[in-house]
Image (cartoon, helix red, strand yellow):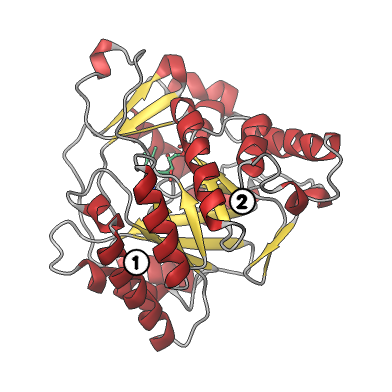
Amino acid sequence: MVDLFPIVRPLLHRLNPETAHDVTLRALKMRLGPRVGASDDPILAIDLWGRHFPNPIGLAAGFDKNAEVFGPMLRLGFGFVEVGSVTPQPQAGNPKPRLMRWHQREALINRIGFSGHGLDAVERRLASRRADGIVGANIGKNKDSQSAEQDYADGVRRLAPLADYLVINVSSPNTPGLRDLQGAAPLAAILAAAQAARDEASAETPILLKIAPDLTDKDVADIVGVALGSGADGLIVANTTVARPDDLPGHLAGEAGGLSGPPLMEASTRLLADVARHAAKRLPLVGVGGVASGADAYAKVKAGASLVQLYTALAYRGPRLVTEIKRDLAECVKRDGFACLADAVGSGL
Ligand SMILES: Cc1cc2nc3c(=O)[nH]c(=O)nc-3n(C[C@H](O)[C@H](O)[C@H](O)COP(=O)(O)O)c2cc1C
């Protein structure tokens, strides 16, 4: 694989982070991204929801909000790619600047707030995709929507026939009131509406729920209870955090938004383990938050994740990271004597 990232990284990082992301998307659309030829170590393969994942490392939501580059991202070696969050109507999101780098910790703070092209565009792009890998669709709600239930149901109805899995995102910190939808009553109503919409679409696409890292023990118990009771197919743990570590530099102290990257690793993995204990193997879990190495990915697996996602580390380390994480994760699984990845899931609980 020819990796130009070490050469272009200093240039990209001289741009403001959102412009750097736009430039990256444009290059990927022009097929300038690298392609990984090597096939995955079979020890990393895992079957979930009737789908075969060649490896458990996925691209988290937010990188390809508009379903424009899932093909090139799959060709980097990701086992799956999640597009979105997509809202029913196009919307601009919050005023810029709304994405900040914390260089020393290779972290980001974002308050983008569901900017995107809307369901029509994403539906059209997913409809024209070739069967070249697993693509999930993450669904959000419009900022000025009158009914969250309606927004999520619209997304499910339109995308269930086109995506390999769907995600109900009630955990982004940048849409006012969104995270309140994680309460037991609104959550049950949204999941019921989502399932009714899936039935209307005559689809059996799995519906996952993505939660925030900033939850109390009671919140976790309630959410897992509602997810199990309402027949959700899995949980993604977790979104960005509104918490701020003590070593946050002063110039970022007043920046609102969600923090992602390594400072999120420990708390999101602890939450994942809590969720796994409550779910007791009744729900597949996806671990996300701060993954930047094979050891991090393995920590998520041991804490109960069948699949692992990342976003922020890719912006700092470039596409080679995906290959490195897969190689090191396979070594960890073998070192500990597991015959396959699935046997390692939850082994640290
Ligand atoms: C710039 C940016 C935009 C994001 N947008 C979304 C989004 O639209 N929907 C969503 O569910 N998560 C979104 N996320 C959260 C990521 O999917 C992920 O949960 C979080 O960043 C933690 O993973 P990481 O530390 O590997 O980045 C976004 C993250 C970043 C950094």
Is residue 118 placed above or below 196 in the rendered structure?
Answer: above
Tell me which label, 2 or 1, sits earlier in the chain.
1
Please say whether residue 84 is visible from this viewpoint.
no
**Quadrant where the image shows the C terminus:** top right
Question: Mark 1: few, some, or many residues within 10 Å (few <14, many ≥20)?
Answer: some
The disc at residue 307 is: 2
Provide the secondary structure element on which disc 2 rests: strand
Is residue 60 placed above or below 292 in the rendered structure?
Answer: below
Residue at x 58% of width, y 63% of height: 282
Question: Mark 2: few, some, or many residues within 10 Å (few <14, many ≥20)?
Answer: many
Q: In the figure, is residue 98 to the left or right of 49? A: left
User: For the residue marked with disc 2, what is the amino acid?
Assistant: Leu
Is residue 81 placed above or below 20 in the rendered structure?
Answer: below
Spatial distance from mark 2 to mark 1, Cα to Cα? 28 Å
Q: In the figure, is residue 21 to the left or right of 243? A: right
Question: Relative to the observer, which residue lies in front, 147 or 116?
Answer: 147
Residue at x 45% of width, y 56% of height: 83
